[in-house]
Structure formats: C-alpha cells, structure tokens
C-alpha cells in the first residue's frame, strides 16, 4: 500500500489539541484555559450584516482575491490601525489567517529552503514549512529576557538558503510584543538575503502597553514584508474563517492565482461580516479589548504573587507563558493538573524546543473562571 508523503507524515499533532481532546473526555467540571479563542460572541451588528447579505443573495463565488469592498475595508483598517499602507490589489482575502500563512509560505519557501522563526512559537509554522517541502528552523529566544526578539540570534541563522522568516507580534504563546529596532534589523537582514518576512499580526489589535504598529510600517523594506491578518481574535470571529494576506503586488497576484486550486475564495457571507466588523460600530470590540486588558492585569498580578510559578507579563494577545517549579515534562504536568485539579493548560513543549518545561495559559475566559483556574493551578503546583 502506498504511504502518505513525507510532507504529511512529518507533521505532528498539536499538543494543544491533545489537551483539548483529553478535556473533552473527562466527566468532571473543568476550567478550560488551553485554547486561544475569545469567549465573546460575534457582535450582533456583524451577524445581522451577514444574515442580510445572505438573504439578499450574496451566497455565490466571489473573485479569488475577494470582494473589492472587503479588500477596501481591510486596506483602510490596516492603514488607520497599524500604519500599513496597501492598495486593494495588494490584498487577498483568505479562509482565516491560517490560509494566509499557508499561501505566504508556499510563495516564499522553495523545496529544501528554510523557514526561520523565533521560538517558542505557534506549532503551525513547522507544519507549514513541511507542506512547502521546506525546512522549519526554530531559533530559541532568551528566556531570561522574557522571550524578547534577539535580532542577532535570528540573523546568524540566515543565509542564501533562507526562504522566509516569520515574526509574530504579539506572540503566541508568550504574549510578547517585539520592539521596533530588532524588527528593523531582522527585516533588513532578510532583504539582504533575498528573503521575505512574514508578519503574523493576527493579535495586533490586542496590544496593551503601546500603540500597535505593523511590521511593514516599521521598516525601510516594506516590499519584503507579507502581512497576515485576521478577524478571528480582535473581532471574536474565529468560526467565520476570514483573514487576509497583504504584500507586494506581484506576490499577491501569484498567490491569488493558486487559490483556484485550494479554496477558490473566502466565504461570501463571511466577507460581508468582515466589512461590518471593520467599518461598523467599534464599541463592542473596544469593550472586548478592555475586558482582555483587565484579565491580563489580573493574571499578571496573580502569577507575580504565586509561589512556584513565574511568567513574563503579557504585553499582547491573551496568553501567559508559565515556568513552573516542578520536575516534570510539560505534557505530563499539564495532564496532572487536568486530572488532579481540574484546570486545563497547554504544554509549552507544543510550541517548540524553546517551550519545554513550560505551560501556556489562555486568559480568553471570564474573570470568575480565571480566578478559579488560578486557584486550582496554585494548589496543583503546591501539591505536586
């Protein structure tokens, strides 16, 4: 029997989903802090705009690049919110940020070429490299500096075989927001190597301690930056599967061409929902942001006072990346906390070698559930 290709077999199952499935199988009350999904419903005006569009017949294919009015809404939002300027023919609307990332990697990483990214990192980067027949290269960032971007470490690994570098800010899993100067250095070095930087900015709207700025707006080489964005996190629209890829026109044109053989186009109804989210009333999203910021402050303060646990204070997204005082592998310790104390976290080892011995906590949950979950975590660490 013919076996699946290496590009498929090399990919490993996410440890986040391992914990998710284990939690689903447990017959007891749990505090679920393992999955990165807003606990808010999509605001009513967005849902109503999508329903109205569907009732009026907007249920057909769109162009491969997406509806012009959707791309215009994305273009305007990127410019006003993050300082990144793109014409609508430099934007393709995608089926979530994951498809945007997949298309970006396919367009920049050739067979045998390297995809570099700072670690710890979202596990999909490794898989995306395999699917492009490329080589994933995790470059660990120093834990003693709170996983901040060390440009020199990344630049030292670049060379003629580098196809692309992924920078994720705010970071999943660490919640770190990278400073402008090392970002500029990385983009300039990538440009010197003829490589692109893929800016994964799906959490950019959840930046807490500074004004969010897109990577393409921070560098003198914006033509070497491909920006991945999404409605999922900032607008509580994970299930709508609506994202985008923005960049230099010739690359976006090539990316749009191959979509005929992948997804053809993003959902027409979801594109109308995105237009409403990006151009309509922003008060519901501002309320969500304020709630996430309050939760960030609470989680940061609790972890600072907790014996046996430490974490860099999250600067964005909705994650804290915990070091724990226990002699246990991350997956084993996460299973112990679930089974013995009823709190579910994601093992740090699921985010690359740099995450070994750590846990990711998602604070995309209500304040009372966070309080209970942190109480359980504190008891679990003390009793281990």
Image (tube, helix red, strand yellow):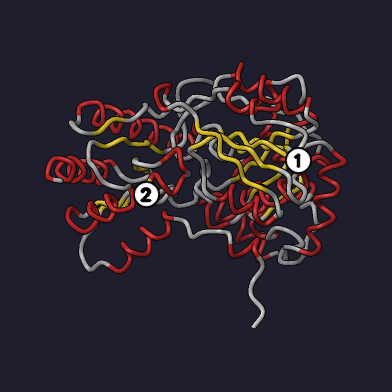
Residue lying furthest top: 181
Of the pair 235 and 313, the residue shown nearer to us: 313
Crowd rating for badge 2 (residues with CA inside 10 Å; few <14, some 14–19, many 20+): many
Please determine whether, in this image, residue 25 is positioned above or below residue 152: below
- The residue shown at (60%, 41%) is 137
Which disc number belongs to residue 346? 2
Work out whether mark 1 precedes mark 2 in sequence or the reverse, and give the earlier one: 1
Residue 105 placed where, x, y %?
71, 47
Q: Which mark is nearer the camera, 1 or 2?
A: 2
Which disc number belongs to residue 72? 1
Give the distance between the C-alpha atoms of the residues marked 1 and 2, in whole angstroms. 37 Å
Please determine whether, in this image, residue 374 is positioned above or below residue 311: below
SS at circle 2: strand
Quarter of the figure with residue 76: top right
Residue 282 placed where, x, y %?
54, 36
Q: Is residue 203 left or right of residue 3?
A: left
Can residue 314 be seen from the camera position used here?
yes
- The residue shown at (49%, 33%) is 206
Of the pair 48 and 39, the residue shown nearer to us: 39
Q: Is residue 221 left or right of residue 11?
A: right
Residue lying furthest bottom: 1
Q: Quadrant of the N terminus?
A: bottom right
Crowd rating for badge 1 (residues with CA inside 10 Å; few <14, some 14–19, many 20+): some
Of the pair 370 and 54, the residue shown nearer to us: 370
Which disc number belongs to residue 141? none
Q: Is residue 147 left or right of residue 10?
A: left
Determine whether label 1 and label 2 are within 8 Å by CB. Answer: no
Residue 66 placed where, x, y %?
77, 52
Residue 341 placed where, x, y %?
18, 53
- The residue shown at (25%, 26%) is 304
């Amino acid at each position: 029997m013919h076996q699946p290709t290496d590009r498929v077999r090399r990919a490993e199952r996410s440890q986040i989903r391992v914990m998710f499935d284990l939690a689903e199988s447990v017959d007891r009350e749990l505090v679920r802090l393992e999955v990165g999904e807003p606990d808010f419903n999509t605001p009513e005006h967005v849902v109503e705009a999508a329903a109205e569009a569907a009732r009026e017949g907007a249920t057909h294919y769109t162009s491969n690049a997406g509806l012009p009015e959707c791309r215009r809404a994305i273009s305007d939002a990127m410019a006003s919110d993050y300082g990144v300027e793109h014409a609508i023919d430099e934007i393709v609307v995608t089926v979530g940020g994951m498809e945007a990332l997949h298309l970006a990697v396919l367009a920049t990483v050739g067979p045998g070429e390297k995809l570099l990214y700072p670690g710890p990192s979202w596990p999909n980067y490794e898989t995306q490299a395999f699917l492009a027949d490329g080589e994933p290269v995790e470059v660990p960032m120093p834990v003693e500096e709170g996983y901040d971007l060390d440009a020199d470490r990344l630049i030292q690994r670049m060379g003629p075989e580098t196809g692309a570098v992924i920078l994720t800010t705010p970071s999943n899993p660490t919640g770190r927001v990278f400073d402008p100067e090392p970002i500029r250095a990385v983009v300039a070095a990538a440009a010197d190597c003829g490589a692109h930087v893929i800016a994964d900015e799906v959490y950019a709207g959840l930046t807490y301690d500074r004004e969010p700025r897109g990577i393409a707006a921070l560098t003198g080489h914006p033509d070497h930056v491909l920006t991945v964005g999404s409605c999922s996190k900032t607008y509580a629209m994970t299930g709508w599967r609506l994202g985008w890829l923005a960049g230099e026109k010739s690359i976006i044109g090539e990316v749009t061409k191959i979509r005929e053989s992948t997804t053809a186009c993003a959902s027409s109804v979801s594109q109308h929902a995105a237009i409403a989210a990006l151009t309509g009333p922003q008060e519901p999203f501002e309320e969500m942001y304020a709630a996430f910021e309050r939760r960030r402050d609470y989680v940061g303060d609790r972890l600072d006072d907790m014996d046996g646990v430490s974490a860099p204070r999250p600067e964005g997204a909705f994650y804290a990346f915990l070091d724990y005082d226990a002699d246990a592998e991350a997956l084993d310790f996460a299973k112990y906390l679930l089974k013995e104390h009823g709190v579910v976290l994601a093992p740090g080892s699921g985010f690359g070698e740099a995450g070994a011995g750590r846990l990711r906590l998602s604070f995309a949950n209500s304040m009372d559930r966070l309080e209970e979950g942190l109480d359980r975590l504190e008891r679990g660490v003390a009793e281990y």
